[in-house]
Amino acid sequence: MSPLEEKLKTLPDSPGVYIMKDAQGKIIYVGKAVILKNRVRQYFHSQKNHGAKVKAMVAKIADFETIVTASEVEALILECNLIKKHRPRYNISLKDDKSYPYLKLTLNENFPRVFVTRRVEKDGARYFGPYTSGLAVKEALELLRKIFPLRTCKNFAKRPCLEFHIKRCPAPCAGKISREDYAHFVKATEKFLEGHTTEVEKNLTSEMLAAADDLNFELAAKLRDILLAVKKISEKQKIVTDAGDLDAIGLARLNSEVCAQIFFVRDGKVTGRESFLLSGAFDEPDEKVIAEFIKQYYSRTKISVAEILLPVALAEDDAKILGEWLAAKIVEPKRGVKRSIVEMANENAERFLSERNARRELNHDRTIGAVEELQKYLHLPKLPRRMECFDISHIQGAETVASMVVFEDGVPDKKSYRRYKILSTDGKPDDFLSMREVTSRRYGKLTADELPDLIVIDGGIGQLNSALEIIRGFGHKVPVVSLAKQFELVFVEGDSTPVVLPSGSQSLYLMQRIRDEAHRFAITYHRKLRRARNLKSELDNIVGIGPKRRAELFKKFGTLEKIKSASIDDLLTVSSMNRPAAESLKNFFATKI
């Protein structure tokens, strides 16, 4: 009898959690059970009813553990915690859920603040989220800071900062507001984040009137401004039902992806929504996907509703346990306004997936699709998956530089970019000589296996021939083309008639992107060298300023303008500077004004 069969015989007849492991001891699945003995045995007996995913998982199980709990709800909570901690391969999970941002309201501080975080802790603070868009949560935070004047500093400053002077913070650090008055803003912020704008308006109105009665007109005016801002936002929210507060969950599938979308309805208005991709869910039935989503989503956020609407009914046991855990009514509405909210969530989940698929297709067309087009139009022997493009930059021959940018499958590979300071032109403009130097330095020591699939030269047929002279001289047979900017013509080896890529084609856009990126990279390097040269030339004319002091001045102040405007005392903070050198520098620039 195998060790697994022996363990199956000793399974407890009680609720709990089971943990499946592979041959390396890695946790591959975590589940809960009302009766552990019955649930775990199902995996190993009568496998004909199992789906492909479960069969694949069972084939990898080398061992399992069980943890007995006092109740089904305790088993549910433990399961959520273990899935969050171990992220097992075969569990349904919120895709990349570790990276979801939250808004944190630090109620555990005397003067709370609100900010974005990706770590949820049991520290007495309130966490709102998760949000699926980092941009969305930043916009929400910016809106909050415009409406509610909470402090933003991590540590109290000694005097009010700019936020106080632009009326974005009441400066509790300087004692400009009492803890009791500050609490009005904190309470309003908390209710606003919960979506209870009607309650916020009611509380703000009563607090504003109370402040006015107490002759605290400054606080009353601030509360009035906040009230008007909240009302303006509330007017934009769509009224959908008089049922009060609820969450509505929608579900959609497309290709191999599954999306759950949750609508937040507060005070009868849709206050927001979030979409979540679910991994490992496509082969699972809708009711199981929804149950797993509820467990994982609400284990990460505080529930503030009494009702959750679903697109499908859950298994009776799941509905009972989840309802008990969340202290909420979990139902599948069949008709009426509540059903229409669920249908709206379903439709938006479908739209999310279709738009995501459209973006993926567009991205494919712009990248690997453009590469495939380019092979066709230029008659290349192989797909140009790796392309290297060169550009020359100078001003009348001064500070001549070259850049090389790399695209892999139509996407910039910035870690492979290279830049070159051209040494062969002696300060005279000579793009052909510059191109021969840079291609010689790049390809002189490369083997055939290290070469790209296509080399692109920025310029016309002259630049192309200069590059070919060097590249063919090394015996390399890699295709080389050039792109002339004026008419976007592509010149190829051995043919004076250029190739005209179709206007509006993705292959043309790809060639333009790689050429423009090479130009940008070259110009950036050229400007850097020119700034360094200008700084060096001016400081070199000052008595007492040598290479060491020049380098330290630039490191300290960053720009020549800041060095010019620095006082003698500021200049003396540079370790190598002395007073005669500082006075010499100040006098030099004073005479040039």
Image (cartoon, rainbow, N blue to C red):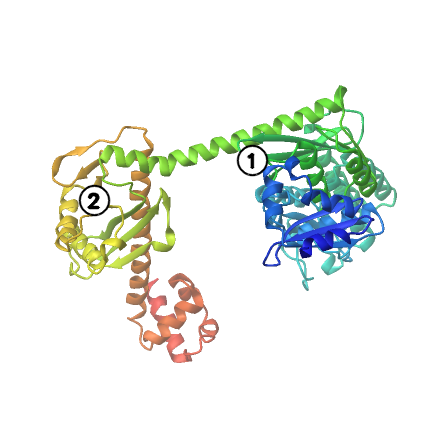
Circle 1 — which element?
Answer: strand
Q: Which of marks 1 and 2 is nearer the N terminus?
A: 1
Count of residue discs? 2
What is the three-letter code of the residue carrying label 1? Glu
Splitting the image into 4 quarters, where does residue 176 fall?
bottom right
Residue 530, above or below 464: below
Q: Does residue 324 appear to the left or right of 140 in the view shown?
A: right
Q: Residues within 10 Å of mark 2 (few under 14, many from 20)?
A: some
Q: Which residue is drawn at 23% across and 52% down?
A: 395
Residue 257, disc: 1
On screen, residue 472 above or below 261: below
Determine the residue positioned at 70% across, 52% down. 5
| Marker disc for residue 479 | 2
- Looking at the rendered structure, the secondary structure element under dot 2 is loop
Q: What residue type is labelled 2?
A: Pro
Query: Which x, y percent locates residue 568?
Result: 45, 73
Residue most extreme to the top: 336
Image quadrant where one finds the N terminus:
bottom right
Q: Judge the density around disc 1: few (<14), some (14-19), many (≥20) Cα neighbours within 10 Å.
A: some
Is 107 in front, or is 142?
107
Q: At 79% across and 35% down in the image, what residue appears?
A: 319
Between label 1 and label 2, give the one nearer the viewer. Answer: 1
Inspect this view and state whether residue 309 appears: yes
Q: Is residue 164 visible?
A: no
Tell me the residue at 33%/41% (across/down).
513
Q: Is residue 133 left or right of residue 300?
A: left
Q: Where is residue 243 in the image (x, y as percent from the top left)?
A: 81, 27
